[in-house]
Image (cartoon, rainbow, N blue to C red):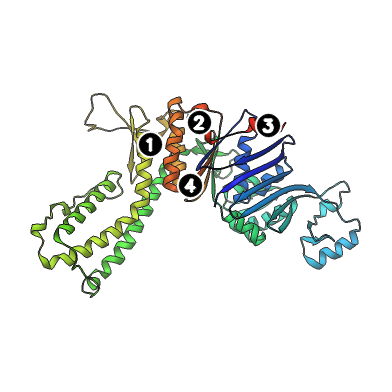
Amino acid sequence: MFIKSISIRKLFGLFDYNLDFKDEINIITAPNGYGKTICLKIIHSLFTYDYLYYFSLDFSEIIFETESGTLKISKDFLEREVNKKKRFTQHRALDDDFFYSETHIIIDNDENEENDENYKPFHLRFNFEGYEYVLSESKFKRQLTVILSEISNLRKAGRNEWVNIKTREISGFEQLLKELDLTKPIRNFLPEWLGDFSADHTSYLIQDQRLLKRINKSPNKNLNSYVQAIDTYAKELKNHLIQSSLDFSVISQDLDSTFPQRLLSKDNSSKNVSKQQIVEELNKVQSNRESLKKFDILPKNTSVDSLITAKNIDDIYVSVLNLYLNDTKLKLQKFDDIYKKINLFSNILNTKLSFKKIKIDSEKGFYFVRQIEGDANNEKEHVLNLSQLSSGEQHQVVLIYELIFNTKEHSIVLIDEPEISLHVVWQEQFLDDLKMITEMNNAKAIIATHSPQIIGDYWDLVIDLEEIRKIGI
């Protein structure tokens, strides 16, 4: 399910935007300060249950229109009950965290807020097709406190701080929401209709700062630790290759253990299969193997399938070879997804990098070699450290990797300023690359960009916030 449109009212107290999303790729552009990155974060926060972002954002109303209906999120202040005794009675009678006012709206009861006569309860109000839910920041943080308390290494260190007792790292709610997958436990305390609405969408946000990834701090250190994203993704790809090999091994073991029984079964019929068809299918399987070997997905051993011809196949072997072919196809299917992604990843990068080439390796994940003039056979690889790539090259590798390997099928990919550190030619090629990737992953994309080179000939996909602002004035 994809978002049809978003309407934002009084963003920063200034802007009213109506954004209509029609195509597989949508481009949001505007001068600095108009909130194009904010638009991406508004979408991502809803589908990751990061309501703290909405509490910190200056707006009055956001309306999401989707195929399943329209969700409205509004910010408002509610008057507290004057009679504290009455409120206390209602609070105790119904729940330890909230009570129902006379208008049946869920209100939080925080002791610190109770003692502040100037405090006005601040809420997010969610409306969807006749349903309503009202949530305050204090209640949401209390629910997060319960969730985080169940994570064994975390202990509360302050009103909005948590300490990891193993690493001594101190984090806030916002940071933990980004680093931990809390979507399932958060969804559990929301109304079913609201939890389902966000669960029906999957979003992945690629932010403008892409080259560094934060990691847990070492014990007794007070500084944040970061690693190069390109190093992390090389290791991730290695793990993908390992997992696909494990999946291949599991199905191979299952099929091999039952091969004799299935061979002798009455259901194993090969009456309509000719020897020539057997040979043709063997050649296709061998070609598939060679493609997988090119990326070190399969070991580079030698197969003799290509040596088999129709002439040296006896009739008694047709059924055996036919079952062997069917089993082999099922086994190799376990590599279909990883091969498709690696092939596109390599093709895109190798058309862009100058004097360098990406290599896929089951031990390293991926690495790069320098191509030396006059070394046409490339007999000796000049292996580069990943850090030896330029900033622009690293941005390209990280961006393409995230788009191909980290986005799920049917997801919404949100990309903030893809042009960062990219050469103008690479910027001009980006949307063509993105279209291939979104088609492969069956995903949609929304981009926030300043770059006319990124947009290129695709101005029909553009949503210009400055123009919307001028029309509204």
Quarter assignment of residue 259: bottom left
Three-letter code for the amino acid on which mark 1 is drawn: Ile
Q: Which one is nearer the viewer's eye here, 313 or 5?
A: 5
Q: Which residue is mark 3?
A: 471
* Residue 66 drawn at (x, y percent): 60, 51
Disc 4, SS: loop
- Which residue is identified by label 1? 348
Kindly tell me whether residue 365 is visible in this rendering.
no
Numbered disc in front, either 1 or 4: 4
Q: Quadrant of the C terminus?
A: top right
Going from N to C along the chain, the mark reached first, 1 or 4, is 1
Residue identified by numbered label 4: 443
Q: Taking the image as drawn, is residue 420 in sight?
A: yes
User: Could you say which is closer to the camera, residue 417 or residue 15?
Assistant: 15
Q: Which residue is mark 2?
A: 455
Q: Which sits in the foreground, 142 or 31?
A: 31
Tag nearer the camera, 3 or 1: 3
- In the rendered image, residue 178, in percent from the top left (x then y), is placed at 59, 46
Question: How far apart in space, not on screen, are marks 3 and 1 (Cα)?
Answer: 40 Å
